[in-house]
Amino acid sequence: MEASSNTTAKTITARAPGRINIIGEHTDYNDGYVLPAATDKGLTVTLSLNNTDTTVNLTASDLSESFSFDLQHFRPAQGGWPNYVMGVVSELQKAGAAFSGFDAEFSSKVPIGSGMSSSAALECSFAVALNELFNLNFDQWQLIKASQMAEHNFVGIRCGIMDQFASVMGKKDHVMLLDCRSLTFEYFPLALEHYQLLLLNTNVTHSLANSAYNTRREECEAGAAILQKEYAGVENLRDVTPEQLLAVRKNMPENIFTRCHHVVTENQRVLQATQALENGDHHLLGQLMYQSHSSLTNDFAVSCPELDFLVQQTLGADFVLGSRMMGGGFGGCTINIIEQQRVEEFVESVAKKYKKQFGVALTPIVVSTGNGAQAI
């Protein structure tokens, strides 16, 4: 796909949101189910042609950082945000896009390291902006997949497709049930009435975060390989029932079994959560969130003391329906469903206890659902 020679718009501004995930953690790369939503907090990028053939100049205004590269000769840098952008450019080039030089400046309202996927917001905002600026005519799924593969090939994190999907396909006041195998999805209204979504950012990111993500993926693949030998038709953990998993437990190392157990039961919780939403049963939704956190802590081992502490503070609080860690783990946020009128006093109380326990300030983030990525 070549860039159109009659590109009329010399400057394009695009915005892509961060995402939350109500439930369904570490299921996406196992062909499972997730229940994410785009948020009202996003990243905005402005792109303009710079009259060079191959030079790209990037500016992260929030960080006061800049980076330049040549469209014909570039490779992953030593970490950092430029890899997400170069990855998107590389994947779109593989899909046939032809670019000339451009300048880009971006700023973000998505907290880095919060589990709201600031990386997907960065990738998807650039994908949408480049699609518009160069009249590439890629569809939304092509942009989603290019953004996902940017993370695989330039960042080195073998993420599933949930984050990029939610950032592009989000719909205000709705969550989305995504089947990560077929990529079919369905919107469900999120009508919380007098309740509010509240994220509590631990402001910690433990060193295990990236390495353990890839390790967990490998452990799930190892479990699936064992199950495939026992059951016909098993392509991935998505195809396994709890009963089947228990039946082969003796053939699995314990850590492989527990990783698989989380994924298999989490898929069930996601489907139960959609039923709860259809029935307006927010109490059940909250209980499923607590079950998810317990599984992520004990079976999947991706929580940390800070996340567990924050979830524990909600137990016994009748004005909190549910709480769990959100995102890859080892830091980031908990997601909570809490009565709107109790948010301020709850945050004040928990923040004091958290600071005393860990010596770190807590950041509350009140979020609402929002629309997906678009050119402005």
Image (spheres, grey):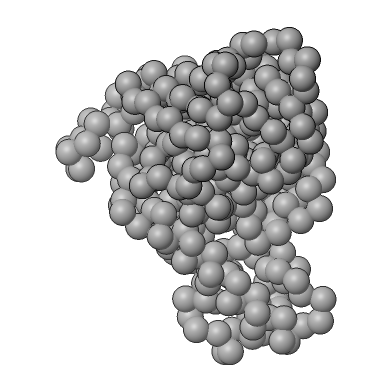
Give whichever of 125, 285 is nearer the camera: 125
Which x, y percent locates residue 69?
Answer: 46, 34
**Residue sitting at 43 percent across and 51 percent down?**
329
Asked if residue 116 can be seen in this view, the reply is no
In the picture, which quadrant includes the N terminus? top right
Quadrant of the image occupied by residue 246? bottom right
**Residue sitting at 46 percent across and 24 percent down?**
57
Asked if residue 250 can be seen in this view, the reply is yes
Which x, y percent locates residue 257?
Answer: 54, 76
**Residue sitting at 51 percent across and 43 percent down?**
73
242, above or below 183, in the image: below
In the picture, which quadrant includes the C terminus? top right
Which x, y percent locates residue 229?
Answer: 71, 87
217, above or below 226, in the image: above
Give whichever of 271, 8 is nearer the camera: 8
Q: In the orientation shown, which residue stands out farthest toward the bottom?
A: 251
Which x, y percent locates residue 164?
Answer: 63, 39
**Residue sitting at 47 percent across and 76 percent down?**
255
Give whichever of 141, 258 is nearer the camera: 141
